[in-house]
Image (cartoon, rainbow, N blue to C red):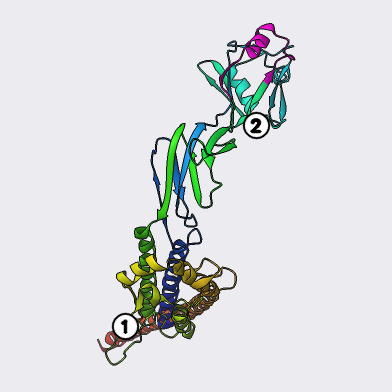
Amino acid sequence: MKKQIDRNSVYSSGLKALDDALKAFRKANEELVKGDSVTRNSVWLSNDAIAKATAAPNAKPGAYDFYVKQLATANQRVVDLPASIKTEGAGSFEITLNDGTTCRVDIEALGKDGKEALTPEELARAINGNRELDGKVRAEVVGGKLVLTSAETGEQNGFTIDASGLNDPDLKQAFESAKETSKAQDAIILLGGENGVEIEQPSNVLNSIEGLTITFNKTGAVTVKVSADKEETVKGVRAFVDAYNALMDEFEKLTRAGNEKNNEAGGPLEADAGVRALISQIKNTLRKSVDGVRLHELGIETDRKGRLSINESALDKALKDSPEKLDKLFGNKSTGLVGNFDALLDTWLDASKGQMKKRMESVEHNEKKLDAQSDDLKRRYDRVYDQYVKQFTALQALQANLESTLTRLNDLFSTKNN
């Protein structure tokens, strides 16, 4: 029984180690083709005070000249409110956005819970909680003043305040004389320099160039250059190679053959034919060509033990002469080598019907079965033990009675002889 329990426990530990190894390998594959490309890009800016930029793997190498004529800004108005806002008969005011959104803030209704007056903070909370406004204008109190700011930049997000519905003269005057501290305006960016093509948009973030995201922070001229980042690309390939080798090392440890003659235990998954089949499938997937491209063409070589290594000069040549081969071979999450690996790993890691789930369910079933057998064995042992204790106790009582009888007989014969 103990051997069965130990074997089941060892097998369970082996499955958990395999699950961790497969998930780590899948994660490495996903990282390799993050952004649907193995190639990584770098961005250079002539003036990083004017703009910041990031390039996704699918960004095309090239240089772009921009002239930022105007930044997009959010509309902001400051209202100098009285310290206490009377609610009775106060009326209401409206906030209307340039996109047509209108909301009515009924100050009188806000006092229906018995409040005779509101603080500026309470009015700000009422504006922020207005469903019609839906957060398009944010309200806050700064230095006792009500500050209203459009949530997004751009002319279309500007707003106006209509105080004609307010009955309190002081409150009405406060809203009508609200100071516009920031005007709602679009960004005006010229692509191609100061005399280039004009782009007008509500945001300071330009993402109309595939794979390139540029955030403009100041007006002025700036050049953005995108180029392939060889160092980061090689780093990604190396991470894949390391992850594959780590997986093979774990497979070797988990399926190691035992040696009874030398009293050497085998790996916890030594007898699992399915795991051995998985190893063969992964190796075969790696050996296949994808779109006519094989690993060795990119400087990724296999040694006698089945481990991968990088021939840096060959990889460097491949990146220089035909970098597109990297993406052809590795593909993405659904195509190429990575896609093939993902489909294969899914047969094991699928949470609802994968091989790992089936094996863990079998382990749990065996564990419950062995626990039940162990409990039954313990109950039988306890029953037999209790029976022997009772018999032993009865025997002791009998022995005590016999010894007492013998003592009385000895005393009796001793008395007669005297």
Q: Quadrant of the C terminus?
A: bottom left
Q: Position of residue 108 (x, y in %)?
A: 72, 17
Q: Residues within 10 Å of mark 2 (few under 14, many from 20)?
A: some
What amino acid does circle 2 point to? Gln
- The Cα atoms of the two marked residues, 1 and 2, are separated by 117 Å
| Frontmost residue, 266 versus 176 | 176
- Circle 2 sits on which residue? 156
- 154 vs 274: above or below: above
| Frontmost residue, 181 versus 259 | 181
Q: Quadrant of the N terminus?
A: bottom left
- Mark 2: which secondary structure? helix
Q: Is residue 186 left or right of residue 53?
A: right
Mark 1–mark 2 CB contact (< 8 Å) = no
What amino acid does circle 1 point to? Thr
| Frontmost residue, 74 versus 2 | 74
Instruction: Find residue 407 and name its label.
Output: 1
Residue 23 appears in view: no
Kindly give the residue lying farthest to the left in the view shown: 418
Q: Position of residue 153 (x, y in %)?
A: 58, 32
N-terminal label among 1 and 2? 2
Frontmost of labels 1 and 2 is 2
- 47 vs 327: above or below: above
Q: Position of residue 78 (x, y in %)?
A: 57, 18
Kindly give the residue lying farthest to the top in the view shown: 169
**Is 172 one of the magenta-colored residues?**
yes
Q: Is residue 370 left or right of residue 99?
A: left
